Image: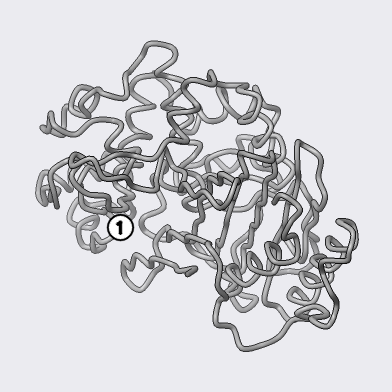
């Protein structure tokens, strides 16, 4: 069942998590459910792609999707196309270089940063977090616990805004976060490694560990050690602390809802759990970088694609910012996100080398429907 876990803070959906394993979205309107009378099984791949493209065009015409889709295999795009506009003016069409807020799809970049630093000898996955963040006096929680969502640390996205204003601040930053937890200590909801529970807090702490271990800000590390080496020039961190004149993210899109601009919230001064923007053109490069071990070794990458095992020996379905699923002979890794107006999803088929990316900046309610349409139309094609 495709579901959104909605993390609510002052009526805002916070860096949602979506698992797409089938089922529809519950939207009652039809958008060319595209020739249901056509026998998909007799179509060529190119004809199936035309069916998907037509469906997405119809959704966009109905203002139910404003975004971009990438479907590729072995680095060759079958569909790499955008639908709609970059902002509320509707003067600027989206392009394949348009950068979308990724929300929780950002987390895979955070764990990549951690893996790079591990290979450089600047940290170990087994390090206690207090070794790198002395503000947190907990020697039982490791970096790997944070990546696996098995730390037991409560999710900061439930913090009320008053926690921030008590510190004389207007929005959340990491210094503000560390001041807050002096007055409102973080709860440990269970013993590290004993359970799995999604926690955005773990990922803002990972971003801070990246900054302290590398000597760079998290944003600069992503820019210098991931985006530039991979020539992903439309991929970077952007939040309330970002310099809008730094020459980065020149093709950044604006979040909209019902044709209105959606501004950032009081939680948008931090990163690691979200705050990265990217384009479908860059995701094609990202997919190939992962496939070809461009940034880390195959051995380290295999750990990212290995599900966590709890203390009692039971398995989870989560690696280092990737959900795991095996269907038939196909091994999939995936993640999704939702924050402000962003609705995003990536799925990689490790068996066939296929990748699917869906990016939307209009708070669509049809993400799972789009996923279902693509997967059913491309059934048997290795996606």
Q: Is the residue 120 above or below the residue 112 in the image? A: above
Q: Which residue: 64% across, 57% down? A: 359
Within-10-Å neighbours for mark 1: few <14, some 14–19, many 20+: some
Residue corresponding to mark 1: 157
Q: Which residue: 61% across, 88% down? A: 28
Q: Position of residue 279 (x, y in %)?
A: 68, 46
Say left or right for 268 vs 233: left
Q: Position of residue 163 (x, y in %)?
A: 20, 57
* The residue positioned farthest toward the bottom in the image shown: 28
The total of numbered circles placed on residues is 1
Q: Is the residue 253 above or below the residue 222 in the image? A: below
Residue 73, quarter of the rendered image? top right
- Front residue (pair 52, 186): 52
Tag 1, which secondary structure? Answer: helix
Q: Position of residue 189 (x, y in %)?
A: 14, 52
- Front residue (pair 286, 313): 313
Q: Which residue: 19% across, 34% down? A: 141
Say left or right for 275 vs 169: right
Residue 126, quarter of the rendered image? top left
- Front residue (pair 106, 95): 106
Q: Which residue: 49% across, 57% down? A: 337
* The residue positioned farthest toward the top in the image shown: 121
- Front residue (pair 172, 194): 194
Q: Is the residue 103 above or below the residue 89 in the image? A: above
Colour theme: one colour
Residue 287, quarter of the rendered image? top right
Q: Position of residue 250 (x, y in %)?
A: 69, 43
């Amino acid at each position: 069942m495709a579901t959104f876990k909605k993390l609510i803070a002052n009526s805002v959906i916070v860096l949602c998590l979506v698992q797409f394993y089938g089922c529809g979205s519950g939207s009652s309107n039809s958008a060319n459910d595209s020739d249901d009378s056509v026998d998909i099984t007799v179509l060529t791949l190119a004809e199936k792609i035309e069916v998907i493209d037509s469906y997405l065009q119809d959704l966009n015409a109905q203002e139910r999707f404003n975004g971009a889709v990438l479907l590729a295999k072995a680095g060759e795009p079958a569909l790499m196309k955008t639908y709609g506009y970059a902002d509320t003016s509707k003067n600027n069409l989206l392009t394949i270089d348009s950068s979308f807020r990724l929300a929780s799809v950002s987390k895979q970049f955070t764990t990549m940063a951690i893996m790079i630093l591990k290979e450089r000898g600047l940290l170990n996955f087994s390090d206690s977090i207090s070794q790198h963040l002395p503000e947190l006096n907990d020697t039982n929680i490791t970096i790997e616990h944070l990546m696996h969502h098995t730390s037991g640390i409560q999710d900061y996205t439930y913090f009320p805004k008053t926690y921030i204003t008590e510190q004389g601040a207007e929005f959340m930053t990491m210094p503000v976060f560390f001041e807050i937890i002096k007055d409102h200590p973080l709860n440990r909801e269970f013993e590290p490694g004993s359970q799995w529970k999604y926690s955005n807090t773990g990922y803002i702490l990972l971003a801070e560990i990246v900054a302290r271990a590398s000597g760079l800000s998290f944003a600069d590390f992503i820019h210098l050690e991931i985006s530039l080496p991979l020539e992903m020039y439309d991929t970077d961190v952007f939040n309330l602390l970002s310099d809008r004149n730094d020459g980065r993210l020149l093709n950044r899109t604006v979040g909209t809802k019902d044709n209105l601009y959606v501004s950032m919230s009081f939680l948008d001064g931090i990163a690691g759990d979200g705050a990265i923007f990217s384009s479908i053109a860059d995701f094609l490069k990202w997919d190939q970088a992962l496939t070809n071990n461009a940034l880390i070794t195959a051995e380290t990458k295999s750990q990212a694609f290995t599900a966590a095992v709890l203390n009692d020996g039971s398995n989870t379905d989560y690696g280092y910012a990737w959900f795991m699923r095996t269907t038939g002979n196909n091994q999939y890794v995936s993640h999704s996100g939702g924050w402000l107006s962003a609705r995003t999803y990536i799925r990689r088929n490790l068996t066939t080398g296929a990748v699917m990316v869906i990016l939307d900046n209009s708070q669509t309610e049809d993400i799972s429907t789009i996923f279902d349409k693509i997967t059913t139309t491309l059934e048997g094609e290795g996606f």
